[in-house]
Image: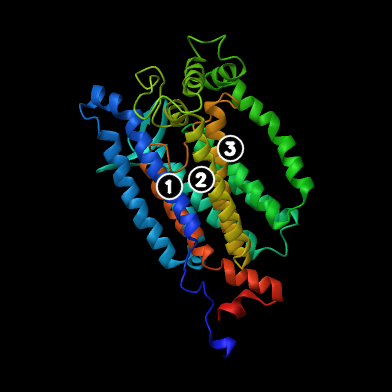
Amino acid sequence: MDMKTTPPASASVRFDPILLCAVLGLVTFGLVMVYSASAVLAQDKLGDSLYFFKRQLTAAGMGVVAMAVAMKVGWRKLARWAYPLLLVAIVLLVAVAIPGVGTTAGGARRWIRLPGFSLQPAEVAKFAWVVYLSYSLAKKREKVATFSVGFLPHLALCGVLVLLCMLQPDFGSSVLLVFMLFVLLFAAGAKLSYLVGSVLLALPLAYVAIATSPYRMKRILAFLDPWAHRHDVGYQVAESLMSIGSGGVLGLGLGDGRQKLFFLPEAHTDFIFSIIGEETGLIGVGLLVALYGTVLWRGVRASLAAGETFGTYLGLGITSIIAFQATVNMCVAMGLLPTKGLTLPFVSYGGTSLVVLMGAAGVLLSLSANAEPATRATRTGTDMREVTA
């Protein structure tokens, strides 16, 4: 039999089913927990216990469409959209800072109200930033190690995005944008001395940003000793720790959590992990971590097997966003980091975040279609484009 005309056994699989199941598992888990964490609040404030659940379910439906479109279009076509996406993100970040356009909630202006839904520009900016960085670093890969071409322009553009986020203010998204810059610069081969030096130079700026902001100083105090500030700035962290601690191994049972009964603020958004720990216990938390670990594993696998520099950077960037946000959110809920305002990916309530992340997951899935061929190409020293031609 002519082996050249015989398709591999896995040729019919156009995506990584393990990665897909992990993402859909997180979304499903999130829908259940959003309802459990928000039903009492929604009934009391809005007269509809399903209010937040229905909105999240709608966002999940839109996310499935975004994921399917991303899988169909494929990751390669994103390269031509790198600049337009970044421009749209910058325009949205500028628009949200304009009074009357951006909507203020909780002391921050982070949303643009549109008919039927709210748009959070920072979520769009995260994805656009990764696409742009991946494209730019791939295009300049021969000069990434140089300061004037590979490092300084990307750092300056990141500074613009961070400045726009800080105007809202959104410290968490700012940290994530900087983190993504350093991850992809490191992956692309930028000089370590540039990365370390810029971090050292940024430390005084970070100190000033915290010291001159009363609400950030309160978050630091709550992080350092939440129990000493149990009834003021440490209240949210203390309630979160009580929620997780009361879950034990098996949890109190779905719907039986107590902290969501107007004790723990933001129970269905930033602190949904606390409710997961309370109602599902160590077993539920372990399942959640396993699902994120699977996304990280399969995402990195697909990225390294992309066969093209742009695809590798793009996959690593998307995977890093998910892993970073998940890690920071869980650490905040457990009092291991100061409050950052980053949601739990695929799980926390938030329409823009869910749709964008599911679309990004679709890009990862389109990358995973190359995983097996790329592995074989690496072993034989064959260029990926020759294998797929």
Cβ atoms at labels 1 and 3 below 8 Å apart: no
Q: Amino acid at mark 3?
A: Val
Query: For mark 3, does the 10 Å Cα neighbourhood hold few (<14), some (14 to 19), or many (20 or more) residues?
Result: some
Residue 376, image x and y in percent?
A: 64, 72
Q: Amino acid at mark 1?
A: Gly
**Residue at (54, 87) in percent of width and height:** 5
Q: Nearer the viewer, residue 184 or 69?
A: 69
| SS assignment at label 2 | helix
Residue 270's image quarter?
top left
Image quarter in which the N terminus is found: bottom right
- Mark on residue 174? none
Q: CA distance from mark 1 to mark 3?
A: 27 Å
Q: Name the residue carrying label 2.
A: 291
Q: Name the residue carrying label 1.
A: 25
Cβ atoms at labels 1 and 2 below 8 Å apart: yes
Residue 214's image quarter?
top right
Q: Nearer the viewer, residue 231 or 110?
A: 231
Labels 2, 3: front one: 2
Residue 94, image x and y in percent?
A: 44, 42
Task: Of the two numbered discs 2 and 3 on the same chain, state the one appearing first in sequence.
Answer: 3
- Residue 147 can be seen, yes or no: yes
Q: Nearer the viewer, residue 124 or 324?
A: 324
Query: For mark 1, does the 10 Å Cα neighbourhood hold few (<14), some (14 to 19), or many (20 or more) residues?
Result: some
Q: Name the residue carrying label 3.
A: 175
Q: CA distance from mark 2 to mark 3?
A: 24 Å
Task: Of the two numbered discs 1 and 2 on the same chain, state the one appearing first in sequence.
Answer: 1
Q: Amino acid at mark 2?
A: Leu
**Residue at (57, 25) in percent of width and height:** 338
Hey, which residue is sitting farthest right in the picture? 193
